[in-house]
Image: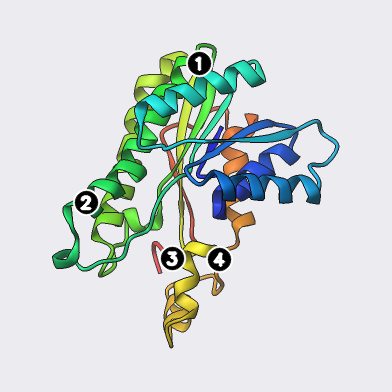
Amino acid sequence: MVTGAARGMGACFAAGLARQGVRVLGVDIDEAVLQASIAATREAGLGTLGGSLDGMQCDVSSREAMFKVASQAVERLGRLDIWINNAGIFPQSDIASVSPEQLSRTFGINVDGVFFGAQAASEHMKNGGAIVNMASVAAFRVRRGRAIYSATKAAVHNLTQSLAVELGEQKIRVNALAPGFIDTEMTNWVREIPGAMDKALSTIPLGRIGQPADVLNAMLFLVSDAAAYVSGQTLGVDGGSRHG
């Protein structure tokens, strides 16, 4: 299961897992874009390892919807081994401009969606599995105008540790990814503001913007047997920007 699979990192995760031979169900609130993305991925090819990619509409901020798609994933695929809590939004507003509705929606998707996803996944992972949550370098390094976004990602970091402790008895490993500046639709704004790209690059010790493949490779590690003794960790994929 990959949430937020219609675009950006979610689409990359869904395609990457399928090309590794995983049978993937991607979900997103925007079903039209999701199905178009899946069609494009299938047309590009899923490789020869036997993976598959299907999609369903789902609002991750709804506990009922998340439990429903988890059950349907098991019905379609036979079992549930991997759950990627990727869905998220990236609002930018000074604190004085944040409305109650914006605050509620951001936490509803970025935090509630992760919690409901873990709850739903754990119901079907009685013999173990891997959950990967999407945190962010923003959980550790704040910027003006990103207060509620940073707060949600800090919550995901902490929640990942708690989930790892509680779900470990089911042999479920729970980890998080903390990407830095990654070249996706969510970060297109940096190309539209004069000087923003240079400023962004100045904070990244490796001197380049991250690519979706960089985060995909980290995710594939966390769900693989190579990470069999890794749980409760938030893995930075940020070119060193957390310390830059």
The quadrant in which residue 220 appears is: top right
Q: Which mark is residue 101?
A: 2
Residue at which label 1 appears: 124
The mark lying in front, picked from 2 and 1, is 2
Q: Earlier in the sequence, mark 4 or mark 3?
A: 4
The quadrant in which residue 8 appears is: bottom right
Q: Position of residue 225 (x, y in %)?
A: 64, 29
The mark lying in front, picked from 2 and 4, is 2
Which residue extends farthest right? 48
Q: Residues within 10 Å of mark 1 (few under 14, many from 20)?
A: some
Q: Earlier in the sequence, mark 1 or mark 4?
A: 1
Q: Earlier in the sequence, mark 2 or mark 4?
A: 2
Residue at which label 3 appears: 241
Q: Is residue 86 visible?
A: yes
Residue at image location 29% in from the left, 56% down from the top: 150
Q: Position of residue 76 (x, y in %)?
A: 64, 20
Q: Position of residue 33 (x, y in %)?
A: 58, 51
Q: Is residue 241 left or right of residue 74?
A: left
